[in-house]
């Protein structure tokens, strides 16, 4: 059994190699890798050593303890 392929009724106009390459360069790839991680928050990551009791007190206040700690540090006079 043979399968007949019907030509397109409206074939796309042919483009030059330069036009084709230009179109390819402006397209976004569907499989383009995404940037890892969260979007920028305007914050700076730091590492500091604190007493275990200090961390335990803040953690005991529940979810969002890091933000509360940051607020207290913001209010502190240095």
Image: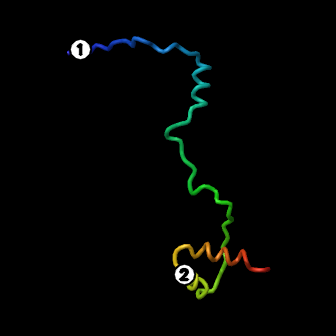
Report helix, strand or loop for mark 1. loop
In terms of image quadrants, where is residue 49?
bottom right
Relative to 30, does residue 58 appear above or below in the rendering? Answer: below
Mark toward the viewer: 1 or 2: 2
Residue name at image x 73 percent, y 77 percent: 75
Disc 2 crowd, CA 10 A, few/some/many (<14, 14-19, 20+): few
Q: Is residue 42 above or below residue 16?
A: below
Secondary element under disc 2, as helix, strand or loop, is: loop
Side of 64 relative to 50 (left or right): left
Image quadrant for the N terminus?
Answer: top left
Labels 1 & 2 near each other (Cβ < 8 A): no
Up the image or down, 63 lies above or below 35; here it is below
Q: Residue at x 59, y 86 (%)?
A: 52
Q: Which residue is mark 1?
A: 2
Q: Residues within 10 Å of mark 1 (few under 14, many from 20)?
A: few
Quarter of the view holding residue 6: top left
Cα–Cα span, label 1 and label 2: 75 Å
Identified at 54% across, 45% down, the residue is: 33
Residue 10 lies left or right of residue 26; in this view the side is left
Q: Position of residue 44 (x, y in %)?
A: 69, 65
Q: Earlier in the sequence, mark 1 or mark 2?
A: 1
Name the one closer to the observer, 10 or 49: 10
Towards the viewer: 5 or 71: 71
Task: Say which quarter of the image contains residue 9.
Answer: top left
> Which of the numbered marks, if any, corresponds to residue 61?
2
């Amino acid at each position: 059994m043979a399968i007949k392929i019907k030509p397109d009724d409206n074939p796309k106009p042919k483009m030059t190699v330069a036009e084709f390459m230009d179109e390819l360069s402006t397209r976004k790839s569907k499989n383009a890798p995404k940037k890892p991680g969260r979007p920028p928050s305007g914050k700076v990551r730091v590492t500091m050593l604190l007493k275990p009791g200090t961390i335990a007190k803040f953690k005991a206040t529940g979810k969002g303890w890091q933000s509360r700690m940051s607020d207290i540090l913001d209010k502190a006079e240095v």
